[in-house]
Image (cartoon, rainbow, N blue to C red):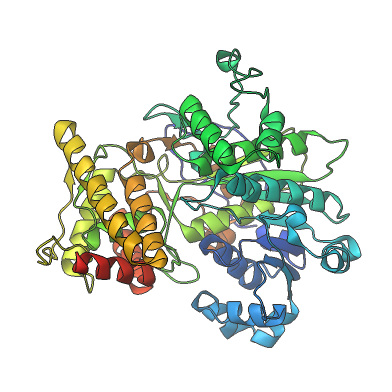
Amino acid sequence: MSSRSTGSGSGRHVHFDSVGNVEIVSTLRGKKVLLTGATGFVGTCVMERLLRSCKVGHLVLLLRGRRGVEPHERLKDLLMAEVFLRLREEVPIEELMKRITVVHADLSMPRLGISEEDWKEVLLKDGGVHYVIHSAASIKLMEPFKKQLQMNFGATADLLELANKMTNMVGFVYVSTAFVNANLPPGSVCVERIQELFKPSYGTKFGTAEYPFRDYHDLVKYFLSPNLADKDADEMARKLMKLWNFWSTYIMTKNWTEQHVKYCHEKKDKYKFQTTIVRPALITSCAKDPYPGYISNNAGPAGMAMAFAHGLLSYSPYKPDRVMDMIPGDFVANTIILGCATMDRSLPSPRILHSSSSVSNPVTIGKYFQLVMEYFDKEPVNQEILRNFFGWRIQNKIRIKFVSGPEKVFRRSLTVGYWKVVIFFAKCISPQLHKAAMMGYGATKLLLNEDVAKGLFFHNGNTVDLYGGLDDTEQKMFPCIWSPVYSWDKYTPIFLEGVKVTQVTTEALIDSITHLLAWL
């Protein structure tokens, strides 16, 4: 037996969940797994690892249907993506397609939008799957709240009911976000537990005409009622965000969904399987698998870096000495798989795993922005978006200034005013350009929101414990802990190169805004 280590933690580590030996490959080999969000960044990383490294027997993917495209064609297109290059080198694509079944679904619809035939003949056939990994979610900034709630909460509730009908079921992994606790004060340590929102301190507010609900069951029922108009739902959501100090409807719906996962886990007379909640921090490009630098979206630090690189912003209201919790996408995928492989014993409540770096190997906002500037000084982007009203191009060498006090207020007002002018002219030109401008404005507002960078420490004690149960071979195969062994100075250029090369800046949006700004 090879030696086992306890992983890398820090002085903040607390012993939460003692476990014995953990084996990923032998546990998952030959098993059937249902995966949602397989076309997203984290989903593709999980899918690639399950097929190439874990040797799962069969994978069931819930994918949104495309008119005129058969499931097997959709699957073939997916498997031809660059992320699966190493997998295709090891396993012929024809063989891979035999190990995967695609079910057309729409997670924004009741019962997941799955046909009755697929429900019976695919999902429930032969006892169904052994594990469900639910990584799909709606993170759109401009989406009506009811639609987002149905996608994030409703789909999860339906998946839990589906899983409960499968006699093979062992465990359900729900991919949440570390920022479900982002309503805590700056610098707080967020531990691995579910935060109760209906606290006694708020008690006088609930069950009243203003807030006609007493717990999260009533809350969700209220919002998903067909009698509640979208605009009224949006207004109530804004009031609750202010009450609970959430800066995003996305993280608020994730918190509510975690409450439901916990409810199902604890209701042992009905739900017989275990659950795990994985909470990633800000996700960056892969550090190792399937290859260093792989990324497929412009969310979080990637979008922030490209906003500075393209000249959309030249300042930041964040405090440079606060920690910025980032974690590579493959470390997130490995943590999800680790959680999947450790469902062998019954726990009284869901096991919560933080996939984070702020405790094990922190980096500050100031340090990250410095690395961004150094990289783009050496490797500038091909074009900048931002031009002033005279048509002069902004200097390509980027500098990020940290602002506070009156200057912060002035610059933020100037930026918001500028975008409102852009949106006005975009609306006059075309609906498509108006939509692109609104997306740009929404992303910019998020970057200017100081609540995004509170410097929270996401305690990863449970993840450290489970990872320490792996032998040396599997610790190298499935790295989960971003320890001091890994250098931010060496990794960040790899991350930014991946962002730049894969053009995650969304070319259509960039082109549209560029044309409009040039016209102005």
Looking at the image, residue 223 lies above or below residue 442: above
Q: Nearer the viewer, residue 112 or 1?
A: 112
Corner quadrant of residue 428? bottom left
Q: x, y percentage for residue 70?
A: 71, 81
Give left or right: position of 516 versus 18: left
Q: Residue furthest front?
A: 428
Look at 63% across and 56% down and name the residue there.
Answer: 337
In the image, residue 291 lies at what x, y percent?
45, 72
Q: Which residue does the image show at 32% across and 50% down from the upper left? A: 444
Classify 320 as above or below 71: above
Q: Residue at x 58, y 38 (%)?
A: 233
Horizontal side of 155 relative to 268 (left or right) equals left
Residue 387 pos. (x, y %): 16, 63
Along the line of sight, the residue nearer the viewer: 439 or 502 = 439
The answer to whether any part of residue 243 appears in the image is yes
Q: Quadrant of residue 118?
A: bottom right
Q: Residue at x 84, y 63 (%)?
A: 119
Q: Nearer the viewer, residue 188 or 148?
A: 148
* Number of marks drawn: 0
Indicate whether 17 appears above or below 102: above
Whether residue 513 sits left or right of residue 197 in the image: it is: left
Query: Taking the image as drawn, is residue 18 in sight?
Result: no
Q: Quadrant of the N terminus?
A: bottom right
Query: Where residue 285 sits: x, y (%)?
Result: 42, 62
Q: Quadrant of the C terminus?
A: bottom left
